[in-house]
Amino acid sequence: MKLYCLSGHPTLPCNVLKFKSTTIMLDCGLDMTSTLNFLPLPLVQSPRLSNLPGWSLKDGNVFLDKELKECSGHVFVDSVPEFCLPETELIDLSTVDVILISNYHCMMALPYITEHTGFTGTVYATEPTVQIGRLLMEELVNFIERVPKAQSASVWKNKDVQRLLPSPLKDAVEVSTWRRCYSLQEVNSALSKIQLVGYSQKIELFGAVQVTPLSSGYALGSSNWIIQSHYEKVSYVSGSSLLTTHPQPMDQASLKNSDVLVLTGLTQIPTANPDGMVGEFFSSLALTVRNGGNVLVPCYPSGVIYDLLECLYQYIDSAGLSSIPFYFISPVANSSLEFSQIFAEWLCHNKQAKVYLPEPPFPHAELIQTNKLKHYPSIHGDFSNDFRQPCVVFTGHPSLRFGDVVHFMELWGKSSLNTVIFTEPDFSYLEALAPYQPLAMKCIYCPIDTRLNFIQVSKLLKEVQPLHVVCPEQYTQPPPAQAHRMDLMIDCQPPPMSYRRAEVLALPFKRRYEKIEIMPETAVM
Amino acid sequence: MDPECSRLLPALCAALADPGQPVADDTCLEKLLDWFKSVTEAGSSLQLLRDSPCLVELLLQVPQAPGLSPRVLAFALRLAGLLAAQEACFQFLQQGELLSGLFGEAGPLGGAAWMAPTVRSGWIQGLRSLAQHPRALPFLAELGALDTVVALQGDSSLFVASAAGQLLAHILGLALGGPAEGPPGPPACDWPASAQAVVGHLEEALSAATAPRATQALHVLTTTFGHCHRPWTQGLWARLSPLVARLLEKDPVPAAHPLVDLLLSVARSPALSSDRGWWEMAARALGSLRPAHAGPLALGLLTLQDCPQALSAQAFAVLLQPLACVLKAAAQAPAPPGWPAGPEGDAAAVATLLSSRSACVGLLCQTLAHLELLQPLPQRPAPWPQAPLLGAVLTVLRFCNGSAVPAPGSDLGGHLCAVLAGCARVQRAALGLLGALYEDAGPPELVTQVFAVLLDYLRSPDSSPTVLKKAFQAALQWLLSAPTPPGGCAPDPPAQPFLGELLPVLQRRLCSPCWEVRDSSLEFLTQLAGHWAGQAGFRHALLASEVPELAWQLLQDPESYVRASAVTAVGQLASRGLHATPAGPECPGGPQKGVLPELLGVLAADPEGFPRRAAMQVFARWLRDGHAEAADAERFVARVLQAAGRDLDWEVRAQGLELGRAFLERALGRPGPPCPDAAAAPEPAAPAAQALRAACRVGLPEFALRALFDCDRPVARAACALLLLLRDQAAPGLSLPEAGPAVAALEAALQRWRAGEQAQPPGPLEPEAVLAVLRSLDLEGLRGALAESSDHVERNPQSLLQDMLATAGLRGDNEADCY
């Protein structure tokens, strides 16, 4: 049994498990942090961005000034943003039989895999995962395609050139494999290969292996997977949460007695308590708005935003914010808000109960009805007529490199009355802000990550008692910034096996038994 | 006993003895026993029995009545004990073997009723009451009660078990008796048989292998030494202390918790504290007990007035041991200077304990709470290690917020990181101690660290509301203790920059979605403004911040507690000239809204009582302090009383009377202490007539007369006191007007209103009319009537007996009710 590790990002995993002659890909996350090296794509012509000076070497050689621009001491690639794909050379991806998707954030590389590697297998995912994943992909494609950029920079990727560049460009890995965004056609083609599954549904793979999705409690339709044969059981835990938010609670009991537990997708901010961060979010929001400023919340169109809108619903009157307009701007805003209301069976018990009353499970329906929350596909069109300040805007993309958020950063960045509040933990907020410097607006970092923290993992492992734990190497040592925090790593016996990008692990586990059936004819012989 | 009770008692006794009758509830039986107790304490029990033979009848019938409720059985046992507490009555009852019948095998002891814990408890309490005279001891011996009591120490009901232990201690005290002072009494071998028997039981239990039996014996001894300080206790301790010492030799020490209680009980006994052997045993106990038990013993020893120096030092080292381990885990350095050295073995045990999550949290919370208790005591160890203690508390707080760096290679440090991170219990305990340590301050660099850690906690989004409240309290204490240079009103660094940093934190906290956070932030702001309003830098920073405006906005908070705190805060800020006066939302840039109209609006319209009460408190303070908003006192008081008079909350009305009293005293020229920022000077003393006229102009007499007949007694009492003040202070100089028709009409209106026949109270009154009414009302009589508790009629014994009879269905009027 082998595990091929194609991604080094612990929360955007992409691993391939070879088990009983089946080849199973576990998630295909897309690392978008590579886009932080690129200049933002403004929706409206930005004189500031277009007039940035080209970057030149210390010796005055300016051969890269067309590709690289300098802004407040940082160097950015002036080109269409590119993404860091999972490894494609470690294993022949055309041999992958199935791809199991655990949540909508972990399927963003799917079109690259299914459309460009000769993949002929099947993808399994739950319905909300597919629908919301589609929204995320469509939004991404829309954000990038609506700001066409003729220029495509490639000279800087030359190894001899790259080593001359300043950090972080100099340290960027695998730049040669970075790819531009896929098209909508590729998205549709990739999604057509997905077969929908329900929680606890048993799916036979070639009669050799059975795979079962379990609720992981992190997002609508998010799953952990059990991969088992008659005598062996592998659990794949990816992006799980024990907090009471909107999704169905995590199914822990079914993970018991695993021979191997592959553990990925823990919280990226283990020191931040989501409740405290929500409190901080609303304090900052209220303080800014009361002061006459605007609040910008760069976010994905699905996920934590549902919980934030729910808290907002409870908080809006008590904080005296009833007259403040809240805008949600995304090409998929409408679909996202509506989809969330129809996936009742995938919601937590309280929200399911509401459906039978009948009431919408999420209170954002009421916010929309009362005109407190308005949603628009983009800043163009109706929005420009309705726009009123001070206001609160939820919009993407959290990287601040594309999407409507770029416009608001340019518009509000110069006033210290305004605030940008970062709630998505996927991007370093300082790096995200770098091309907007100097910036007068206030920046608040309130990352809300509901995924398992190390204390919860420790309890989970004691509860389910797997024989072996396999995890990304980042989880086996404290975070570099807090090297003394020995509690911020996985502590279990035997110690976990760790993996890194482009590594192949032989799992510590020998198959001893095999169930076979003998045909009567053979038995007679 | 009054004749009515004597008349009712036979019927009640008959009802109680009748198993077919419904039984009154426990409360009634308890009240009945209380009444009997007061009767027997006031006179002869024997006489009571002679006057009320039904009682003897009841006691005779009870053991024979099958199916009687356990409650009645228990009541009878306790009543018998109460009556037999007097020797003469005891003899009278014993003549007919009544007591043996009740408490012996013939009574509930041998029957099915004994299964009820109430009956067992009644049996013990009866004997406890009875055992007041020497004749009781042979009676108990005859019954063989001692063995039963010893067995009941292990009863499944904790109440019964505890009462059994107390009875044993009582029997021992009764048997050994003797003078309050003098020689230790006869040697143990000459003790009475009953004392010998009890002590024998105790010796056996202390030598037993099982911890529960030792625990029972230790409880008895703790009660004995705790309540009885007679000389014989020295002999008892001399006899039993070797057995107690033997318990300390075991590992682990059995029954450690009751053992600590016993040792401290002995230490506090004046008869025993001079025993040198005891101090040695205490020292041994500190070394043998586990840290969780040694801590309470150490604290107990340190709070003693006469603890020997060496033992005190040892106890303090034991108490500090967990913190020493925390410091070591963080610094890997020898103990800081001034830190008492503890034995290495103890340190190892503590370190082991700290590495387990639940034990670590429990031990640290206990240690921190003990030190918080010890810190303000005069007998605390000297020199007090203020600096290392501060350092240790700060280290604990840093472990709790993840900023502590464990010593390289320290396993304990790693464990503490994992165990303490985000632990609100330890955070609260540590902040509590940190707040208490403010009195002794410390080296400036440590004080800087204190403010830095407090700021971290106040800023952290992860601080829970209760932790934040503790952090606010500690911050206030440290701010108040910050030295102020002579001649200046600004605190020294580092308090000054801390004060500046606080305002952005407060701003954020006042916008928290959690109402508890908003509430404690407002409370903190109120206190902060109260202490620092005079400091120019603080005033400037506060006025430049959004804090006053946010406090103002919170007057509209949906949570009533927050609105109440906002009212107090705005009132405080206004009295110091620090309030925000935002323009009305309807017309930005228009005229600013005043504080008084806003708070009057709260008083008139807030649907909850807390904000309205807070508003009344603010108004009363303003008037007493001579605040600018109350400069036109008459207009101010008239407006407030008008709003408060209609209030449904009795506390608001009572506070209205307080305000009226303050106004009257001010009008009479007896104002309270003026506030430093007073805007208006107190008015000069006015003649009584002027004061009365002023009171009439603001509507005070009408307000007080209405309140006099308020259905809430505290309001009526306050009104009565105020009217008495008005009559005695403001009216004596005035001649009584002739009782004209207007006064008569007013009196009639008052009577009607009091009787509920008139919906509206009397209207505005002229001074003459007020004077006439005040003199015609029997205010002293009213005061006396109002001083009686509201249930004084219901609490009398006749009422009790009638109620119980009514429950039993024996009263005629109840029969009529059956229709």
Image: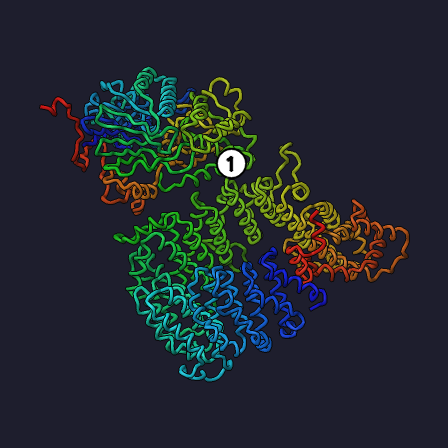
Q: Is residue B573 left or right of residue B665?
A: left
The percent position of residue B467, horizontal first and vertical second, equals: 46, 49
Give the total of numbered labels: 1
Q: Is residue B654 left or right of residue B535?
A: right
In the displayed structure, would residue B636 be above or below residue B335?
A: above
Whether residue B294 is visible:
no
Q: For the view shown, which residue lies furthest in the left direction?
A: A525
The percent position of residue A435, horizontal first and vertical second, equals: 37, 29
Q: Classify mark 1: helix, strand or loop.
A: helix
Q: Is residue B748 left or right of residue B418?
A: right
Please name whichever residue, A438 or B169, is drawn nearer the observer in this view of the structure: B169
Please name whichever residue, B199 or B543, is drawn nearer the observer in this view of the structure: B199
Quadrant of the rendered image containing residue B681: bottom right
Q: Which residue is mark 1?
A: A286
Quarter of the image containing the C terminus of chain A?
Answer: top left
Please name whichever residue, B652 or B154, is drawn nearer the observer in this view of the structure: B154
The percent position of residue A315, horizontal first and vertical second, equals: 52, 36
Q: Amino acid at mark 1?
A: Ala
In the displayed structure, would residue A508 be above or below residue A330?
A: below
The percent position of residue A445, horizontal first and vertical second, equals: 41, 37
What residue is shown at x 90% (from left), y 57% (from top)?
B738
Quarter of the image containing the N terminus of chain A?
Answer: top left
Whether residue B422 is visible:
yes
Quadrant of the rendered image containing residue B643: top right
Please name whichever residue, B774 or B47, is drawn nearer the observer in this view of the structure: B47
The 10 Å Cα crowd at callout 1, few under 14, some 14 to 19, many 20 or more, is many
Q: Given the image, what chain letter belongs to the residue carrying mark 1?
A: A
